[in-house]
Structures are given as C-alpha cells and as structure tokens.
Image: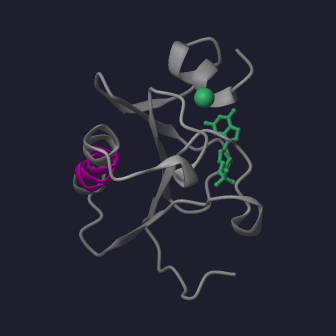
Amino acid sequence: MSCLFCKIIEGESPSTAVYQDELVYAFADINPKAPVHVLIVPREHIGSLSEADTGVAKRALLGHLLCVAAKIAREKGLANGYRVVVNTGPDAGQSVDHLHLHLLGGRGLSWPPG
Ligand code: 5GP
Ligand code: ZN
C-alpha cells in the first residue's frame, strides 16, 4: 500500500485520532495551519474529489464527511466559525492523493485564499 492516508487509516503510520466510524477517519494535521486543523478522510481510497459522482454511494459518503466536519467543529467549540477545504488537483495544491477535508478554525481566516 503506497498511499500515506491509507497507511494512517490502517494504523501503519501514526496519527492522532479525532473521530472515527465505519466510513470515516479524522486526525490532526501534522503541520497545522490554524489552532484547530483536522483532516477528515474516507476509509475507502478515493484519490480526489474529481472522482466523485452523483451515485447514491458517493452521495452518502461525501455528505457524511461534511457532517463529520460539523460534528468535530461543534466538539472543538468552533462556535465563531470555521472553514472546510478540499484541495483538488495540482492547481489547488493537493499534496496527498487520498480525498480529504481540511477543517480549519480557532482564528480568523482570510478570504479569498491564495
Ligand atoms: P493537501 O495539501 O493535500 O490538501 O493536504 C495534505 C495535508 O496532509 C497537509 O495539510 C499536510 O500537513 C498533511 N499531512 C501530510 N503528511 C502527513 C502525515 O504524515 N500525518 C498527518 N497527520 N498529516 C499529514
Ligand atoms: Zn489512500
């Protein structure tokens, strides 16, 4: 298995778990860009958001990823706001080819992003 996030999900690479269920694993980003920076990934290897379609399975999984982001944000006390980011492809700077949501919060976040 060559995918870093698959290794993290399988426990072959260490991580700090924040949330997990049968579909999703969430863990602290190793290089946090905000006081709260959590990565939320599907256990299933999906390379990027580009692979998403509107089939029922993906619809349910991708919706669940967002709901997990909201749940973690509540648990982390991000009542003042937060941002969920899905970098997709080279122009967006995606550096790990396993679909992931960034949950960022705990400070003001400028807009637009770079
Ligand atoms: P991307 O640039 O693909 O949107 O986001 C990848 C994220 O994965 C980056 O924020 C980076 O800090 C994080 N990351 C890379 N390698 C590791 C690792 O080994 N462990 C953890 N926890 N995060 C990682
Ligand atoms: Zn993977």
User: Residue at horizontal 58%, vertical 88%?
Assistant: 112
Name the residue nearer the viewer: 16 or 42.
42
Q: How is the image coloured?
A: one colour
Name the residue nearer the viewer: 114 or 94.
94
Q: Is residue 51 visible?
A: yes
Seen in the picture, residue 102 relative to 83 is either above or below; the reply is above
Seen in the picture, residue 50 relative to 6 is either above or below; the reply is below
Q: Quadrant of the N terminus?
A: top right
Q: Quadrant of the C terminus?
A: bottom right
**Magenta segment:** 62-71
Q: Quadrant of residue 110?
A: bottom right
Q: Is residue 69 magenta?
A: yes
User: Residue at horizontal 77%, vertical 61%?
Assistant: 90
Q: Position of residue 5 (x, y in %)?
A: 61, 30
For ligand 1, which image quadrant applies?
top right
Q: Position of residue 11 (x, y in %)?
A: 55, 13
User: Residue at horizontal 54%, vertical 29%?
Assistant: 45
Q: Position of residue 43 (x, y in %)?
A: 44, 26
Position of residue 18 in the picture relative to residue 33 (left or right): left
Predominant SS of the magenta segment: helix
Position of residue 56 in the picture relative to residue 51 (left or right): left
Q: Quadrant of residue 73?
A: bottom left
Q: Position of residue 91 (x, y in %)?
A: 75, 69
Q: Is residue 14 visible?
A: no
Name the residue nearer the viewer: 26 or 96.
96
Position of residue 21 in the picture relative to residue 51 (left or right): left
Q: How many marks?
A: 0
